[in-house]
Image: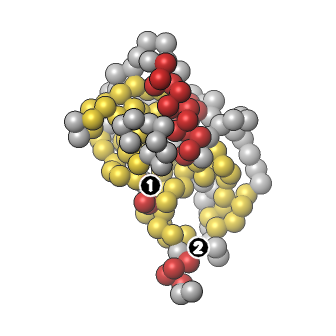
Amino acid sequence: MNAAAEELYSLLVPLAEDRLIVPRACVAEVVRYSKPVQEPGSQNWMLGIINWNGRALPVVSFEGTIGKDIPAVTGRTRIVVFYASTSQIKAGHFGLLTQGFPQLVRINKEVLKLDSTEGWPEGAPVLCRVKMINEYPLVPHLENLESMLAEETAQA
């Protein structure tokens, strides 16, 4: 197997106090922030729905899903549009609030190590934290996040 086959193009997605690392192939687009329309009675992490390419796109705050405060919207705030990897979300996509543009990185087993520190509640959509050179991004459990989102949107 050659070196290129052992690398994965990924995105470091900036949050308020952390970063996520996700495969590049999970992301459809990064769009400018527009205020979501929130359903009354929804969880605080479920920010609401925006119109994206003529579709109703549910938008979430990852910080909210792990029990942290929802970050304030700034001029750098964007929405990262993810492809849904399960059939639980009717729209086929969902948006995640981010505090800037994701950074493209190439990762391989030499630069990526498991970090044993935690810091998120049980049941949160986090697989683990990794050490990547001088970064300690979270690896989100996207299927779990989609399940949370599907359950929340079914109640709306």
Point 49% across, 18% down: residue: 155
Viewer-nearest residue: 1 or 21: 1
Residue 45 image position (x, y, % from top left): 52, 27
Looking at the figure, which quarter contains the N terminus?
bottom right
Disc number for residue 26:
1
Going by the numbered disc 1, the residue's amino acid type is: Cys
Disc number for residue 108:
2
| 23 left or right, relative to 54 | right
Q: Can residue 74 be seen in this view?
A: no
Point 46% across, 25% down: residue: 153
Q: Can residue 155 be seen in this view?
A: yes
Spatial CA distance of label 1 from label 2 is 17 Å
Q: Does 45 sit above or below residue 84?
A: above
| 35 left or right, relative to 2 | left
Going by the numbered disc 2, the residue's amino acid type is: Asn
Name the secondary structure under disc 2. Answer: loop
Q: Which residue lies furthest to the top in this view?
A: 40
Q: Residue furthest bottom?
A: 2
Disc number for residue 4:
none
